[in-house]
Structures are given as C-alpha cells and as structure tokens.
Amino acid sequence: MFEFAWPWIFILAPLPWVLRVLLPPADSGDAALKVSFLADLEGLIGRRARANLPAWRQQAPFVLLWLLLLCAAARPEWVGEPQPLPTSGRDLLLAVDVSGSMDYADMRWEEEDVSRLTLVKHLMGEFIDGRRGDRIGLILFGSQAYVQAPLTFDRETVRTWLDEAMIGIAGKNTAIGDAIGLAVKRLRQRPANSRVLVLITDGANTGGEIDPLTAARLAAEEQVKIYTIGIGADPEQSDVLGILGLNPSMDLDEPTLTAIAEQTGGQYFRARSSQELEQIEESLDRVEPVTQRASQARPAYSLYSWPLALALLLSIALVCHVLWPHALQQRPQWLRRRT
C-alpha cells in the first residue's frame, strides 16, 4: 500500500506564493533603465519575450518542481503486509563489575595472562551472540550502577558496548546492591516469567546505597531470577602470592552471592578459569525460553528518491533552457578568439 509517512508536509504547498505576497520586492539600489524597445532587444539575443507566454505556462515548471520537492520531503513509501516478529525468549540483563579489582590479570585466555574483565568480554560476548530471540541489556557497575545498553534485540550493539567497557568507568568500589536494584527497575515492566539477571563480580559489596540482600528480596518480589558469577583464580602454591599466603580472590563474598541466587530462584557459579566460565555459559543457555505476546511489523520501502530525482532533472532542464540561447550567441565570439 502506498502512503506518505509525513503527509502534513503538504501544508507548505502555498508557501512560495505567501512569501511573494508578504515580502517586499527586491531593490538592488541601482537606478532602473526603462526602454520602450525591450522586446526588440530580447529578439536580438535570441530570447523569446516572456510576456508573450501565458502566466500559467511561465510558472508551471516551477510549480511542478516545488510539488516534487514536497513529495520527496513527505517520505513516500510502499508499506507491505504485516510480518510476525520472533518474540519468544528471555528479557536478560547482564550486570558486569568494572571496579578496580577486575583489572587483576590472574586469568588465562589463549595461552596468555589476561585481566578478569578481558576474559568476561571474550566469553560473555560469545554468550550475547548466541541469545537469538532474547532481549539483552547491559549494566556496568562500580561505585555506582548505570545502564550501558537497554533491553534490545540488537545483540551486536550490546556486545560492542561490553567490549568498550573500561576499568573504573563507574568508580573503584563495588555496588552490587545498586546493580540489582537498577536491574529490577528495568525488568519489572517485562513479563513476570521472563525476567533474568546475570551478575558478574569478583568482590564484595563496598559501595552504593542498597544492601545486596535487601535488593535480592525486592528482586524476588518482582520475580526477577538472578544468576551470580564470582570470578577470580585461586593462587597456586608455586605462585608468589600463594607462597606468601595471599589470595587475590579473598574479597569475593561467596556467601552473599549464593544467598542472592537462592533467594531469587537462580544459581551461584564460581569461575576460576576460562574453562569454568565456558561451562557456566552452557548452564545459562539451558534456561528455558518463555513465550511472550506476539507482535507484528509492516516492512516499509522508501520511495522518496524518485520524486527527488525528477526534481533534479527538471532543475537541470530549466537551467539549460535559460543558458542555452545565451551560449549560442557567445559561440561566434569564442571562435573569433581562437582564430
């Protein structure tokens, strides 16, 4: 079906005539030379006197040009038949810790030592790519929590935002409770049985305004299922930290993360290596999709280029019509100059 996306543009149709009436005539400031033999002068240079043409024929090309421009601006389009959209799946928010401790390089990826956040970017990026049919969103949290990407079917954009996340962008502390509270706020408008939050952190709650367990109770009331992932390698005895008895993951609050998951019907996972994180991805992929309300969309094919192209051709024709007689008169002068 043919239609205009912005049909109100046509109310501008009388604009040139309104401006002609309202605006004063142009005045160059020079004295006008009035002669009684203007028609004879026009005949000498090969131009047809415009006074001999009816007024409507003089204005017709410009009226047509203006209407073509209005048609292009009104966005003509051909709208197809309604097409169903795939809407079965989850509304899944991914909350990633970007505090200072996530920069600790105790993980391995492709035979190289990488930071915890780098490993999360690699593996959770693949996890995002595999979520066809799911709405995916991204929350980054440190001292504060904020939505980096709202719930969307555009998985590529969400992965790009995850890849661009930087350590300390939200502060150096860890506001787990605020991240959960923000996720609940975003998910509460979605169907109750499709709300999922995956929270990844390597520490304990050291910032924010909301206690994590209080936020977990609120999530349980709103039927938001939370899967928590504690990331960070255990030191080996051969490592310097292991010999000194230091544990780079000692700040990880596993009891709280476990309680959050259990209270909301989710599960707590411990990721000490890339292999364990890959296994966690497979476990998360087994979460069953939920059928949501079906929706439809009508494909629209833009046609504005056709009237715009016609307007361009008409403009070229008008310019040639004005300049061509003048060019014919000037040609003998060019030839004389060459000789």
Image: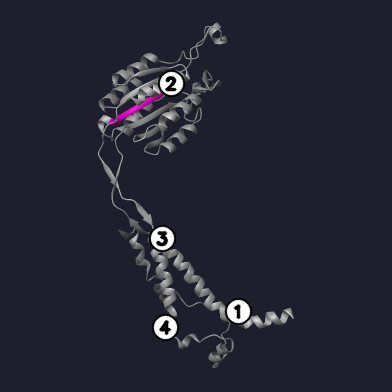
Residue beneath disc 4: 55
Q: Look at the picture and state if 337 lies above or below 88.
A: below
Could you tell which of marks 3 and 2 lies nearer the N-terminus? 2
Crowdedness of circle 2 by 10 Å Cα count: few (<14), some, many (20+)? many
Q: Which percent across, then down, holds residue 86?
A: 31, 39
Q: In what quadrant of the picture does the C terminus appear?
A: bottom right
Cα–Cα span, label 4 and label 2: 79 Å
Which is more N-terminal, label 1 or label 4? 4
Q: Which residue is mark 2?
A: 277
Q: Main secondary structure of the magenta part?
A: strand
Q: Amino acid at mark 4?
A: Ala
In the image, is residue 36 above or below residue 7?
A: below
Q: Is residue 223 magenta?
A: no
**Which SS class for mark 3?**
loop
Residue placed under numbered mark 3 in the picture? 304
- Sequence order check, earlier mark of 3 and 4: 4
In the rendered image, residue 198 lying in the magenta stretch gets the answer yes
Whole-number angstrom distance, CA of label 1 to CA of label 3: 34 Å
